[in-house]
Structures are given as C-alpha cells and as structure tokens.
Image (cartoon, helix red, strand yellow):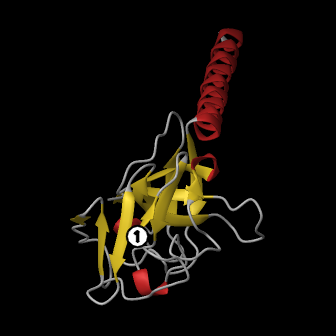
Amino acid sequence: MQNSEKRRRVKSAFEWADAVVSAVVIVVLLFTFLFRTIGVEGSSMVPTLANGDRLIVSHLFYEPEPGDVVVIVQPDSDTPAIIKRVIAVAGQTVDINFGFGTVTVDGKTLEEDYISEPTYMKRDVDFPVTVPEGCVFVMGDNRNRSLDSRDSSIGMVDQRYILGKAIFRLFPFDTIGLIQ
C-alpha cells in the first residue's frame, strides 16, 4: 500500500510540474510573439500615462491608426523607446494653429479630450505637413512638454520603428486597465 501511495504522489508531482512548465512556456511564447511589456519614462504622455507606468504592447499584425498610443524605437539614438499618440497616417495633412492651440487633420479640428492643455508649443517643423507613405505623425498628450513630430529630431516616424500599440496598463494597480 505504501508503494502505490508513493507512486500516486510521484505521478501527481510530475503532473503539477508538467502543468507549471507548460504554463511558463505559453507565457514566454505569448510575450515573445504577441505582447511586450514597456515602462513609461518621462511626462510627455500626461495625463494619459505617467512616469513609471508599465504597459502591455501588442505588435502582431499591427497597422497604425489615428488615436493609437504607440511605442517607437529610435534606431540612431541612445534614448530608450518613446511613447506617443498617432495623430495622422500616410497621406493625411496635419496643421496646427499655435495661437488657438488646435490641431487639424485634413481640415478637421481634432477633438482631443486626452490632452493636458492646448498645443501652444511650436518646434522647428513648419505646418501644414503631409505625412509621407510608410510614416506616421505622432504627438505626446502633454503637448507643451513633449518632443514629437513637431520637431525635426523626431519628425515623421517610419512605421518600421513602431514596436506596437499600447493596449493595457499593468501598473500602478490603481490605474490598471485599457489605454484610451
């Protein structure tokens, strides 16, 4: 009776180990091919995102759309990935009235309830601009404290440098949820 009890316990332990290993492999595969986690650095996306937030980013079959919050790598820079909002995609024309603080895309003023304040900060890009093929125009939600496509150091972002769309905030726990 003791031998059968030992075999049952050993079998149970192997089943648990198998389940744990399978779960770990599935999580690793998901976060390798479907999702990534990224930390927010800086305040350019306040009030939507804050310094220290942890995000889940999806990149599988992703095609940028206006309004998406995206993570961008800068291949010729020592700075980490940046997080911005897509304002316009290829073929769209962006104009900014810095006196009124409004952004227009293809002649329509954007309803931007996600920004911290109107867009008064001008950089070195002259407007209006048309987004070239294969690129996007991005801006931070904290418009007057964001380095984005209004500055030639960022400029139009080649879509190949977009790691993916930020879809979910993991941390801090009091703000956990989908990214709007």
Estimate the x, y position of residue 35 in percent, counting from the top left. 55, 43
Estimate the x, y position of residue 12 in percent, counting from the top left. 61, 20
Count of numbered badges drawn on the protein: 1
Split into 4 quadrants, where in the image is the N terminus? top right
Q: Residues within 10 Å of mark 1 (few under 14, many from 20)?
A: some
User: In the rendered view, would you say 117 is above or below 159?
Assistant: below
Q: Residue at x 62, y 20 (%)?
A: 15
Q: Residue at x 50, y 69 (%)?
A: 53
Q: Horizontal placement of 89 versus 151: left or right?
A: left
Name the image quarter holding residue 143.
bottom left
Estimate the x, y position of residue 5 in percent, counting from the top left. 64, 15
Q: Residue at x 47, y 64 (%)?
A: 138
Between 59 and 88, the residue placed more toward the observer is 88
Split into 4 quadrants, where in the image is the C terminus? bottom left
Estimate the x, y position of residue 9 in percent, counting from the top left. 64, 21
Between 19 and 41, the residue placed more toward the observer is 41
Between 96 and 22, the residue placed more toward the observer is 96
Q: Is residue 59 visible?
A: yes
Q: Amino acid at mark 1?
A: Pro
Name the image quarter holding residue 128.
bottom left
User: In the rendered view, would you say 175 is above or below 37?
Assistant: below
User: In the rendered view, would you say 25 is above or below 93?
Assistant: above
Between 41 and 98, the residue placed more toward the observer is 98
What kind of element bears circle 1? loop
User: In the rendered view, would you say 135 is above or below 113?
Assistant: above
Residue bearing mark 1: 128
Q: Horizontal placement of 94 versus 157: left or right?
A: left
Q: Residue at x 66, y 25 (%)?
A: 13
Q: Is residue 176 visible?
A: no
